Each structure stands twice: as C-alpha cells, then as structure tokens.
Amino acid sequence: MFVRIFNAYFSTRTLLLMVFEAFGIAMAFTVSCFVWLGQDADLFLNYEGGLAKIALITCVFVLCMYYLDLYDSLVLTNRREIVIRLMLVAGFSTLLMAILYSRYPNARLGLKTFTLGVVFVFPFVLFWRELFFWLSRSKRLVERAILLGEGPLADELVELIKNRPEFGLDLVGCVSAFPAQLEGNARYLGTPDRLPDLVRKQGVHRVIVTMPDRRGKLPVQELLSIKSQYARVQDGTELYEAMSGKLPVASLRLSWLLFSPGFHVSQKLLLYKRLVSLAFALMLLILASPVMLLVALAIRLDSPGPIIFRQKRVGKLGTIFTLYKFRSMFNVCEAGDNHRPAMANDDRVTRVGRWLRRTRLDELPQLYNILRGDMYFVGPRPFVPSQEEELAKAIPFYSQRWSVKPGATGWAQVNRGYNATVEDNIEKLAYDLFYIKNMSVTLDLFILFKTIKILILSRGGR
C-alpha cells in the first residue's frame, strides 16, 4: 500500500507508476532509434552510447513530470490535466535537453530521433496512466478496510481514504459504540461486538483502530483473534501519518507521543545538520552575493526604509534570536514584533517586495542566521514571540516545535502554503511534528529537493 523512502511515505502504486512510465519513456526513444536507424540502431544503442543518452533523456522527462505534479494525488486520475501537463513536460524537457546539448554536444541523440521520441512519449505514458486508472478502480486489487472507533481521527481517515485512491484502500464502513459521533461519509456497520463477524463476512483485510479513548473499551480479545486469523490490525494514527505526511494533532495522545518510534535526535545527526548547513550557507552566500547586491539596490530605489529587516523570532527551546530578511514591506508597517502576518495581495508589500516574496529572494539574508547557528537549513519555520505564545496556548503540543532548531525551509513549507490563521497553524504543526518525529539526513535532502521545485514554480509566497 505504501513504502517508506527518505523517512517519508509514498504510495507503492504511484512509485510503480513512475518506474513503468520511466520505462515507457525509454522505450519511446528506443523505438524512435529503430525507426530512423533501422538495423544500425543496435550498434548505436550498445556501442555508441545510445542507451546512456536515452537514460539521460528519461531522467529529465521524469524529473519534469514530478515537478509539474503529474504524480500528485489531485492529478493522478484527471485525464484532462494529464494531457495538458504532458504537453508542458514535453516543452520543458525539450528546452532542458537543448541547454544540455549546447553544453555537452556528445550527449546528443539526434534531432529526428529526439523529435519522434517526444511524439512517442504520449501514447506510451498515456497507456500506463490508463492502466493505473483501471488498477485504482478495480475492487479486486484493493484492501477492504473497517474503521473501529469515532472522533476526529476517524472522520479525517474517511476523507483521506476516499480522496487518495492510489493507496489502494476500500473503506467498507465504521464500527462504533457511539454512532452519533460519526461525522464522516462512511457507512455505519454496527457495534464493536459484531467486529469479528463483519471482518469475516465482508472479506476485510485491514482493521484500523481510531478509538479516542481506549482504556477498558478496546475489544482486545476480538482484535487478537482477527489479527491471527483474518486481517491486519493497524493503529489509525500510524495510517494517517503514512497517508498524509503529518500527525493528527486533534487526536494525538500523550502516550503515543511518548512511546512511538521517533522524536529522538542523535548527536551525530545534529552534527551533520550543523556542518551541512554551514557548508551550504557559505557556498550560497558566495554564489548569491551579486544577486543580493542587486536586490539591495532595488529596495533602496523602490521605497524609503532600511534594506535589511530585523525581527525577533523563537528558536530552539524557546530562545529568542534576531532573524534577517530583505525588507519587502513599507517600514512603518513593519516596525515592532507584533505586526500581523502577510495576507494575499497585502497592501503593505512594496513593488519590489512583491517580487522578492514570490521568488523567495527576501529570505537570502537568513544565510547569516544559519552561519551564526540560529537556524539550520531544514527545520520548523520560526515565528515572532507574541505569535508563538498565542499559538502555544491555543494548540496542543505546539511547544514541541521548539525541541529542534528552526529552519529556512521545512516539511510544512514544502507541503502547504502560507499560514495566517489558527487553523492554518494547526495543520502546519501537524507537518512539523511529522518532521521532528522522522528527522533524518535523507528526509532533509528530500525537503531540499521539494524546496527547489517550489522556488522554480514560485509557489506559496505572499
């Protein structure tokens, strides 16, 4: 159903789709070689580097497909979006290959072969997509599941399972002693004492436990019998984490946070994060210094006020540090630590500031914060003290964000947009807790990879 890579969870079906589509793209260009070269294609592919050239093109195509969200759950089963985005992929991939070919002429595949290969990509990829649609709809190739319990976690899982068909779960219904508390769209099947019969008669493969209060109410003997004879028994929080990439803040239990794997950071990992952050910050400061000078000049010419904006933010263990950014708002509106968060089309943003926020260039001075050790490259986003205090009072477990150093980018930043309301920050915390629980070298690298995608597409800024 899902597999764990880079300490994050991915749908097994989606990963298989990516692999088979990569194979299809490679086949499209291989067939193109045989069309144009005939019998000489075998010589070209095996002895003249043809296979390596096709592998390079395949990697570029798959990368563009990922960056254009062709593996996103909202696009996976939308035929119209797939066709439109495939056309964009063909255009961007051709442009990238042209740039590569101009720099490395020996990597060229040949204009005719490349052009026909691009044409062949469409039927090859669309074939695998149609097969994916069929697999997603087939009742024989899904796991039938029952929810045991009610409450916020059950309601959220009902929606997740319904909206994420790529995970291959078919929700039969819910079993609960309190049916009036079920707010989701799942069918009510009966009380927990009927669970073994329901599992057997409905052909259920997975029982997902979502009971908010389990002390003395969990049907332990029935679940043990089901686990040993019929189906897998899984904690709902575990499944929610895997399917959504976040933790269910509204239904988290202190005991689960205490005894679940994760939430422990080794000294080796902290040393790695510090060294990597230091190296990247130094490298980027050197590379970005001409851009930073131009940005500083643009800010000075655009509006009155300082070039650098300084603000108190909350760091590890609640310590306060000064964060540095390029000023993107009129200075009179930014004075103090209690200014309101930026909204869409905020009239406080300057002309240059709007562009800086969209491209994230206003964040470049934070490289100095990383050099000083206030922040890592990857971690929960820091906020002003007054805002943090309010959110800590309003949201359970919010102070857990302060257990690690903040970051210039993070799991919450690459998975959702800007945060302005308490509801936004509850979801942000859900992603931050997932990161803190699963923090690792590979997850940091994956976040940086996704950050590049967001920067290229200019998403999420205000």
Image (tube, helix red, strand yellow):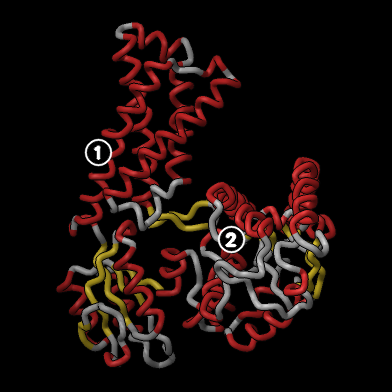
Left or right of 21? Residue 310 is right
Left or right of 351? Residue 193 is left
The image position of residue 219, as x and y in percent, is 33, 86
| Quadrant position of residue 120 | top left
Q: Which residue is at the far left?
A: 201
| Quadrant position of residue 353 | bottom right
User: Which numbered dot is residue 461?
Assistant: 2
Count of numbered badges drawn on the protein: 2
- For the point 21% across and 86% down, which residue is it? 190
| Quadrant position of residue 343 | bottom right
Tell me whether the residue at label 1 lies in contact with that at label 2, contact meaning CB atoms closer than 8 angstroms: no
For badge 1, the amino acid type reads Phe
Q: Which residue is mark 1?
A: 127
Q: CA distance from mark 1 to mark 2?
A: 36 Å
User: Which numbered dot is residue 73?
Assistant: none
Mark 1 Cα-neighbour bin, 10 Å: few <14, some 14–19, many ≥20: some
Above or below: residue 17 compared with residue 154: above
Query: Quick check: can you spot residue 256?
Result: yes
Of 106 and 175, the residue lying toward us: 106
Quadrant occupied by the N terminus: bottom left
For badge 2, the amino acid type reads Gly
- For the point 47% across and 11% down, which residue is it? 48
Above or below: residue 337 compared with residue 374: below
Mark 2 Cα-neighbour bin, 10 Å: few <14, some 14–19, many ≥20: some
Left or right of 138? Residue 5 is right
The answer to which of marks 1 and 2 sits earlier in the sequence is 1
